[in-house]
């Protein structure tokens, strides 16, 4: 917004973090350009209120350790389909690199029988000395 951009809308689920965000905005003298709203992103992005401004940028920190577990792609898609996000608006982050490793599970049941899944080997290294 300081570089000539328009309005900034920040969404946060937690009241304390929303309040902190508002205090940061005020401390930087940006109350006229930056608004921090307590809301679930899914609620606002999939059903924007009547007259909501169209957004020029989608910037999110909705990322878990796997990168896509907090519905980042579906929320961005809903914002674009619902008209809240302009068609040419960039998405940030624009890409993600996910690193993976092989884990061997032995004698621990299945994910369907409520057994705890304890790996016995990780990338070829036996874990039994530490379990």
Image: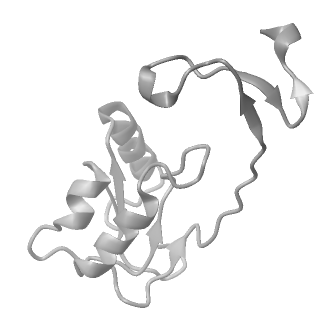
The structure residue drawn at horizontal position 88% and vertical position 9%, both measured from the top left corner, is 129
Q: Is residue 53 left or right of residue 49?
A: right
User: Residue 85 at x, y = what percent?
Assistant: 33, 79
Q: Is residue 16 left or right of residue 114?
A: left
> Is residue 69 among the parts visible in the rendering?
yes
Q: Is residue 125 above or below residue 76?
A: above
User: Residue 78 at x, y = what percent?
Assistant: 29, 71
Q: How many marks?
A: 0
Extreme residue toward the right, this view: 125
Extreme residue toward the bottom, this view: 88
Q: Is residue 26 above or below residue 18?
A: below
Q: Is residue 43 above or below residue 104?
A: below
Q: Quadrant location of residue 8?
A: bottom left
Q: Quadrant location of residue 48?
A: bottom left
The structure residue drawn at horizontal position 31% and vertical position 65%, both measured from the top left corner, is 32
Extreme residue toward the left, this view: 50
User: Residue 124 at x, y = what percent?
Assistant: 90, 34
> Is residue 54 among the parts visible in the rendering?
no
Q: Is residue 52 above or below residue 9?
A: below
- In this view of the protein, which residue sits in the foreground, 17 or 64? 64
User: Residue 39 at x, y = what percent?
Assistant: 25, 48
The structure residue drawn at horizontal position 49% and vertical position 83%, both measured from the top left corner, is 4
The structure residue drawn at horizontal position 55% and vertical position 17%, both measured from the top left corner, is 116
Q: Is residue 105 left or right of residue 61?
A: right
- In this view of the protein, which residue sits in the foreground, 71 or 114? 114
Q: How is the image coloured?
A: one colour
- In this view of the protein, which residue sits in the foreground, 75 or 15? 75
The C terminus: image quadrant: top right
Q: Is residue 124 left or right of residue 75?
A: right
């Amino acid at each position: 917004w300081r570089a000539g951009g328009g309005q900034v809308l920040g969404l946060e689920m937690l009241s304390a973090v929303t309040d902190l965000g508002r205090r940061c905005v005020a401390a930087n003298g940006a109350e006229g350009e930056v608004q921090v709203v307590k809301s679930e992103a899914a609620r606002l992005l999939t059903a924007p209120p009547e007259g909501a401004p169209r957004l020029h940028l989608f910037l999110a920190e909705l990322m878990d350790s796997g990168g896509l577990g907090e519905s980042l792609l579906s929320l961005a898609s809903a914002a674009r389909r619902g008209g809240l996000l302009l068609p040419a608006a960039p998405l940030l982050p624009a890409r993600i690199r996910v690193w993976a490793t092989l884990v061997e599970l032995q004698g621990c049941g299945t994910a369907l029988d409520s057994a705890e899944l304890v790996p016995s080997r990780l990338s070829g290294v036996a874990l039994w000395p530490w379990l």
